[in-house]
Amino acid sequence: MASGTSRRERGESTCQRLIATARRHWQERGYEAASIGGILAEVGLARGGFYHHFADKRALFEAVRDQVEAEVLSWMRGVEPRRAALQARLERALPDDPAGTAALAPLLLGALEAAALELADQPDADGWRQLHTSVTLLLEGLRLVSLQGMVPAVPKSAEEDRAWQTWQRRGASTPRS
């Protein structure tokens, strides 16, 4: 039984090495230019071993995408990497609009997946920080609009910016029902 566990652990380790190596190759070369052969050579695995874990290059890509999605969603203030967790965050942002949160969850998740795939080409953390800031602003904006029942204009001057800051503070201090 111990050897079965050991075999399973080795298989999981190989799968994770394939995902990590493919992710790096795609970041460095792009999806089309990176070959399965090059990935396998680096991992030290034969094609048969690859097909034991993945049906094809697309299936490996989906595993990488799932990993990136999980990282992005976990990174968003420690939520669990599932659609339900994203919807729960939206429900906190829009407590009085369950139909709206149900409609927004797949839209936001799609946007996050697209952003994550775009950011996968950027080795530095600046893009990821900007994504986090953008998502936080989006959710906070949704919450404020829901609480105050109006959509603010984007500030165009210093005076408008001060008014915007006041509006945000007022929204942040508005008690929830």
Image (spheres, grey):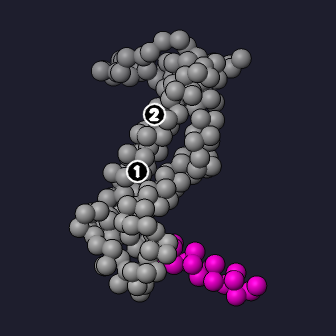
The image shows residue 173 at horizontal and vertical percentages of: 63, 22
Amino acid type, residue under disc 1 in the picture: Ala
Q: Earlier in the sequence, mark 2 or mark 1?
A: 2
| CB atoms of marks 2 and 1 within 8 Å | no
Task: Say whether residue 113 is visible.
Answer: yes
Confirm whether the magenta stretch covers residue 45. no
Residue at figure coordinates x 54%, y 48% from the top left: 73
Amino acid type, residue under disc 2 in the picture: Leu
**Residue 8 in the image: above or below residue 113:** below
Name the residue nearer the viewer: 116 or 166.
116
Residue occupying the far left of the picture: 33
Q: Which residues are magenta?
A: 1-17
Distance of label 2 from label 1 (alpha carbons): 14 Å
Q: Name the residue carrying label 1.
A: 116
Name the residue nearer the viewer: 153 or 158.
153
The image shows residue 156 at horizontal and vertical percentages of: 30, 21
Looking at the image, residue 11 sits to the left or right of residue 31; the answer is right
Name the chief secondary structure element in magenta: helix
Q: Quadrant of the N terminus?
A: bottom right
Residue at figure coordinates x 55%, y 13% from the top left: 148
